[in-house]
Amino acid sequence: MRNCLATKILSIAMMVLTPAAMLMAETGNTMLYASGNVTLNGTEVARSASVTPGDRIDTAGATATTMNQDGSKVTVSPYSSIRYGSEAVRVDRGTAAISTTDGMAAKAAQITVAPKDKAATYEIARLNNQVVITSQTGALMITEAGTTTELEAGASSSRPADPTPAPAPAPQAAPVFPGSDLSSKDVFIIAGVVAGAAVATGLWAGMAAAGVPPGGFGNQLSTTSHQGRGMNRVISVARAAATPVLNGVANSARANNNAAGARVGQHRNIRAAAH
C-alpha cells in the first residue's frame, strides 16, 4: 500500500517537472516562473515561460523567479523591473536577488556587481536614485567609473544611482559701464557737447601755435606758413571730433527710416487684405 502511494507521488512529481526540464533542454535558455501578475516583454505570464537574453521582466505585486541550466537563479521582487542577460541581469527598478554558482553578475545604473568567486548569493536594489548591494554569502566585486572595490560577505553598500553632476557655475552679471543706461537722445547731446569742447580746444591750440593774439585775427591781410599749419591743425581736430557724431546721427536716421518704411508696408498689406 505504501509502495503504491509512493509510486503515485513520484509519478505526479515527474509529470510536473519533466515538461519544464524538457523545455529548458530544448530551448537551452532560462525558464521564468510567475506567482502572480508578471509580464515578460509586456505580455502577461500565466505560470511559466522561456526567457532569452534581452527580455524584460516586470512584476506588479508579485514575485518572479528565473532559473537557468548553469544553476543561477534570479528572484525578482514585487514592483520591480529587470532586463535579463545570459551573463548578467540589469535592474532598472526595484530589487533582484541572485543566487549563482557560475558567477552571474548584476548591473544597476553605472554600477556592476559580480561574485569574487563563482559562487555567491546577493541582492541588488535600485530605489530612490540609490543602488544598494547586499552580500549574503560570498564576497562581491563592485565596479563603478573604472574603479573596482570588494564587498565582504555579509556586508552592504549604498551608492548614488548616477554620478552627481558638478554644480553649474553661477552666471556672471554683464559689466555695467558708466552711461550704459542713457537713451540715444542723451548720447547725442553729450557727444555734441564733447565735440564742441574738442573744437574749441582745437581752435585755441591752433591759434596759440600760429601766434594769433587773444583778440582774434583782427585785420591781418596775410597768413604766414606758420599760421597755415595752425589752421590745418584746427581743421583736423574739428573733423576728428565731429565725424563720430555725424556718423551716429546718420545711422540713427537710417534706422528710423527703415523702421518707418516697414510700418508703412505693414499698413499697406493690412489695407490690401481688408479690401
Image: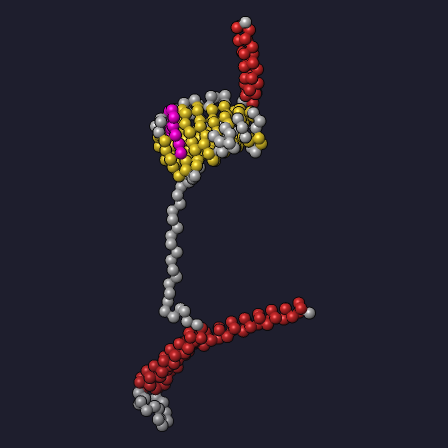
Instruction: Identify the residue at horizontal 58%, vertical 27% (top origin).
Output: 46
Above or below, 175 relative to 88: below
The image quarter in which residue 39 lies: top right
- The quadrant of the rendering that contains the C terminus is bottom right
Is residue 241 in view?
no
Q: Main secondary structure of the magenta part?
A: strand
Residue range of the region highlighted in magenta in the rendering: 132-141
Residue nearest the observer in this picture, 49 or 114: 49
- Whether residue 227 appears in this view of the structure is yes
Q: Is residue 69 magenta?
A: no
Q: Quadrant of residue 40?
A: top right
The number of numbered discs placed on residues in the rendered structure image is 0
Q: Position of residue 168 (x, y in %)?
A: 39, 50
- Counting from the top left corner in percent of width and height, residue 5 is at 54, 8
In the rendered image, the vertical position of residue 93 relative to residue 32, given as above or below? below
Magenta span contains residue 133:
yes
Question: Residue placed at 47% from the left, 26% from the top?
Answer: 74
- Taking the spot 47% from the left edge, 30% from the top edge, the residue there is 77
Seen as rendered, the residue at the extreme front is: 1
Q: Quadrant of the N terminus?
A: top right
Nearer to the camera, 102 or 228: 102
In percent of width and height, residue 257 lies at 54, 73
Direction from residue 182 to residue 13 in the image, left or right? right
Q: Residue furthest bottom?
A: 219
Of 180 and 274, nearer the camera is 274
Above or below for 134 versus 2: below
Dividing the picture into quadrants, the one containing residue 11 is top right
Left or right: 92 with respect to 194? right
Nearer to the camera, 224 or 121: 121
Q: Residue at x 40, y 68 (%)?
A: 180
Q: Is residue 198 above or below residue 271?
A: below
